[in-house]
Image (cartoon, grey):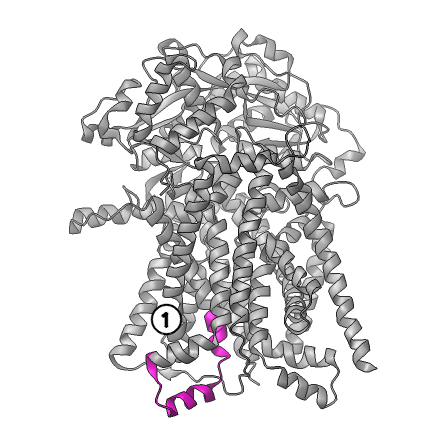
Amino acid sequence: MKKFLTIILALVMILCLAACGSSQPAGTKDAAEAPKGGTGNLVLYSSMTEADLDAMLGAFAEVYPDINVEVVNGSAGELVTRITGEAANPVGDLVWGGMADSDGTKNAEIFEAWISEHDAENPENFRSKNGLYSMEHLSTVVFCVNTELEKELGLDIKSYEDLLDPKLKGKITTADPNSSSSAWNNLSNIFAVYGNDTEETWDYIEQLMPNLVQLGSSSQVFKQVQQGEYVVGLTYEDGAVGLLRDGATNIRLQYPTNGTSASVFGSALIKNGPNPENAKLMIDFLCSAEGQNAIAAKQGGTLRYTNSGFKMPENAWLTPSEEITWAFRDVEYLTANKTAILERWNELWAKVGGTVVQ
Amino acid sequence: MESKKKLELWTAVSIVMFLAFLLFLAYPMFGLLKQSIMSADGKITLEQFTKFFSKTYYTGTILNSMKVTLSVTAVSLVLGIPFAYFYSFYNLKGSKLLFVLAILCCMSAPFIGAYSWVMLLGRSGVITQFLKSTLGIQIGSIYGFNGILLVQSLKFFPLVFIYMNGAFKNIDNTLLEASANMGCTGVPRLFKIILALSMPTILAAALMVFMQAFADFGTPMLIGEGFQTFPVLIYNQYLGEVGTDYNFAAALAVIAIIVTAIVFFFQKWGTSRFKFSMNALHPVEKKPAKGVIGVVMHLYCYLLTAIAFMPQLYIIYLSFRNCTGAIFKPGYSLVNYEVAMGKLLGRSIKNTAVMGIISLAIIIIIAVIIAYLVVRRSSALNNTIDTIAMLPYIMPGAVIGLSLLLAFAKKPFALGGTMAIMILALVIRRLPYTIRSATATLMQISMSIEEAAISLGASKLKTFVRITVPMMANGIMSGAILSWVAIVTELSSSIILYNNRTITLTMSTYVAISRGNYGLAAAFAAILTVVTALSLLLYLRITKSEDVRL
C-alpha cells in the first residue's frame, strides 16, 4: 500500500512539475513582438473596486474592442511594492487608483515621466504636480453617518464641531494616516479648514482624538459604519457612495459644512512595461472628457472626474460640485511637511488617543 | 572504514543543505535587511534603530504584541492539552469529525476570519444583538486586547491539539501501566508522567503558537481598534500607501528577527532539559469514555470546537445570501457561486492543489533531513541551518514575498510571476512547522533501535529510510498536516507574487474583498473550507490504512 501510494505521489508530482513548467509569466510572450496601439494585451494594476473597474473596462472596450485587458488587484501600497519588486522585469503596464497628488515624486523610480496631453484640460489646481501621474479623478472628504445610530443618540452631525460631542466617544472611525491615503486626505482637510499647522488646528485635533477609533483599513472605515459598529466614519466619497449604490439604507454622506476638499488621483505609466502603447491609450482614455463621461454614465455618477469637459450624469449618486462648500487645501505645503505632521499626530495619538500602552 | 564513508555522506548532505539555504533564504533576506543599517541616501548608520526606540508609539507595539502573544500561548495550551488528552486516551464518539473541525478552525485566512467575528460579536453583531434582545445580556467588546486574545486562542488551540496528539501516540503504554501499578493514576499521572514525557512537544507547540500569534497581522488590523501590534507596524511600513520607508521597515524586520531568535533559543534550551527517548512498542490503547466524566469530555471537546468553528459556519451561511457589493440583501440563492465560476474558480482550485502538493512534498523531505542532522548529528553547522530555517517564521509573509521578488526577478532567475517563486515562498515560510515537529519526534525515539538495526547489518542510510523515518511518521504527519493547512491558506506572501495565472483560492477571496464584493468572497472562502475538509478526510483515510505501528 505504501509503495503504491509513493508511486502515485511521484507521478502526481511529475505531472505537476510539467504543468507549472508550461505556465509562462505574463509579458514574456509579448516581448518578442512590440504591439502597436489598439490591439494586443494590457496589464492593469488597480486598487479600484469591482463596480468602478467593470464600468471603466466596459467603456474602454467600446472604444478599443481589440485590446485584451488583464487586471491585477491590490491596495495602492501593495501595488507599488509589487512594481518595485518587479522592476528588473516588469509585468504591469499601468496603475489606476491610489496614486494621489500628495505622493510628490516618491515613485519616480517606477513610473515613466510621461503624462497624458489631456491632463492640461484639468482645472489648474487639479493638474499633475509630479509629471508622473496623469490626474483624472477626485476623492472628496466626507463624513459617512449611520442614520439609525445618529437618531438614537439624538444628534445631527453636520460640521467638524459636531464631531466633538462627548456622546461620540469611541464612535468615530478613521484609518491610520501613516498608512492610508484616505486618512491623510481627511487630516489634510482639517488643515484646510482650520489653517495649516496653526495652534487652532492642533487644538481641534487634540479634542477630536478621544472620540476616534483607528482601523487598519480605509474601506472598513465606512463599511463598519454601515454595519452599525460606529456612528461616523471620516472617509472619502467614492468609497462611501458605493454603499448607497449597492442598496444601503441606513447611511448618508455628509460633506462637512465648514468646507471640504479633495485629494486628486491619477493614472501612471509603469517604467519599461510590456505594452506601453496600449497603456498610453488607456491613460489618455481615462483623462479625456469623452472617456470620463462614458465611464460615469456606466457608474451612475459615483466618481468625480477632473476634466473641465466632464459633467456629472443626471441622477448621480454623488452630490454635484455646485452644492458643496469647498475649502482651499495647500497641497504643496502639506506634502513638504508630511513627515513632521505625522510625527506630531503620532505623539498626540500615543498621549490622548486610542493606543493602549501600559 | 565503512562508517567514515557514511559520515561523509551526511556531511555532504549538511553542506548541500547549508548552501541551498544560503542561496534561497539568506541571500534574499540579506538583500532586504541590509537597508536597516543605511539611511535614505545610502550611508551606514544606526539611525533607523534609534528612531524606533525613541518613540513610545513604536516601542509600545512590541510590548503590546508580547503581552497579547504570551497570553494567547498560555490560553491555547490550557485549551489544547486537555482536548488532545481526551482525544488520544479515550474513545470519543465522532472523533474523526472533531479532528477535521478542529483543524479547520486554525485555517481561516487572515482578513475574512476576523471580519466574520466582527459580524458575529461586534457591537451590531448577530450574536450580540441576539443576546441583548432575547436574554438581556450585554457582552463585552470584541475589540482590543480581549478580542484579539479570544480570536487568536480559538484559532491556535488546534495547533497544540495536533502536536500533542502526535506526542501522546508515541507514549509507551507500559510506562502508564507501571505507574498505575505504583499507585499513580488519573490527574497526577497526567502531570507527572504524560506531560513530563511530552515536554519537548509542549514546548514545540508553545513556540509555534507564539510565533504565529506574534506574526498575525490580519486579526489585530481589523479588531485591534487602536491596540497596535508589531506586525501591523511592519506591514504598514512595507505595504502602506503613505510614506513607505524601506530603511525603517528593514530595521523593524531586524528587530522582529532578534525577538524571534531570543524566543527560539529560549525554547531550545528548555527542550534540551527534557530529553527523553522511548519507543512506541506498546502504543496507548484508547479507553472508552464512560459515565459523567465521559459526558464532560464530549461536551468540552464539542463545545470548544463549535465555538471556534462559528465564524467559518457564518461565512458559509453568508455565501448563500444575496449580496450586492458590500451589502447583504435578504434572500438566499447560489448567485455568489455562479459569479465565482466566472472569476477563475476552477483555476484557483487547480493552482491551490498543485502548489500545495509540490510545496508539501519538498517541505517533508527537507524537514526530515534537517531533523536528522540536528538531532543525530548535532554540530555548529547543523544548528546554524536549523536557526536559519526558522527565521522566516517571524517575518511577515509580505516581507518574504518582497525579498524573493527583489532577489529572483532579475535576469539569471527571472522568476517573477511564476509558480516557482510562489512555491519557493511557501516552502520557506512553512518549513519551520514540520522541522519542529520532526525534531521533537526524533528526540523521543531512542538510539537503541537504530543501533540494533545497524548491528544486524543494515547501513546507516538503510536504517534511516527503513527504520527511523517510519518511526517518525506520526510526528511528521502531524507537522505536515499543519503545513498543508497553512500552505492552502497562504495569503500575505502571495499578495505581491500572484497574478491571474497563479491565483489561488485564498487570493481569490482576498481579491473579492478588496474589490468590495463580499458575497463572492464568502463563496470562495466556503469553497476553501470544503476543499480543505476533503483533503483532511483523505489524509485520515491514508493514515488509517498505513497503520504504522512497529
Residue situated furthest bottom in the rendering: B181
Q: Residue A72, how many percent across, how many down?
A: 59, 36
Q: Is residue B269 shown in magenta?
A: no
Q: Start and end of the magenta stretch?
A: B164-187
Name the foreground residue: A197 vs B524. Answer: A197
Q: Residue B33, how many percent across, how many down?
A: 64, 42
Q: How many marks?
A: 1
Question: Can residue A301 be seen here?
Answer: no
Identify the residue at horizontal 43%, vertical 27% (top origin): A183
Q: Residue B70, how many percent across, how many down?
A: 42, 55
Q: Is residue B180 shown in magenta?
A: yes
Residue picked out by circle 1: B82
B410 lies above or below A291: below
Identify the residue at horizontal 50%, vertical 87% (top origin): B282
Q: Residue A126, how many percent across, how many down?
A: 53, 12
Circle 1 SS class: helix
B437 lies above or below B427: below
Rendered-image quadrant of the C terminus of chain B:
bottom right
- Give the quarter of the image for residue B302: bottom left
Identify the residue at horizontal 52%, vertical 63% (top origin): B267
Name the foreground residue: A319 vs A227. Answer: A227
Rendered-image quadrant of the N terminus of chain B:
bottom right
- Disc 1 marks a residue whose amino acid type is Pro
- The chief SS type of the magenta part is helix
In the figure, is residue B515 to the left or right of B146?
right
In the figure, is residue A205 to the left or right of B505?
left
- Give the quarter of the image for residue A218: top left
- Disc 1 sits on a residue from what chain? B
Question: Can residue B217 be seen here?
Answer: yes
Name the foreground residue: A350 vs A55. Answer: A350
Crowding at label 1, few (<14), some or many (≥20) Cα neighbours within 10 Å?
Answer: some
Residue situated furthest top in the rendering: A124
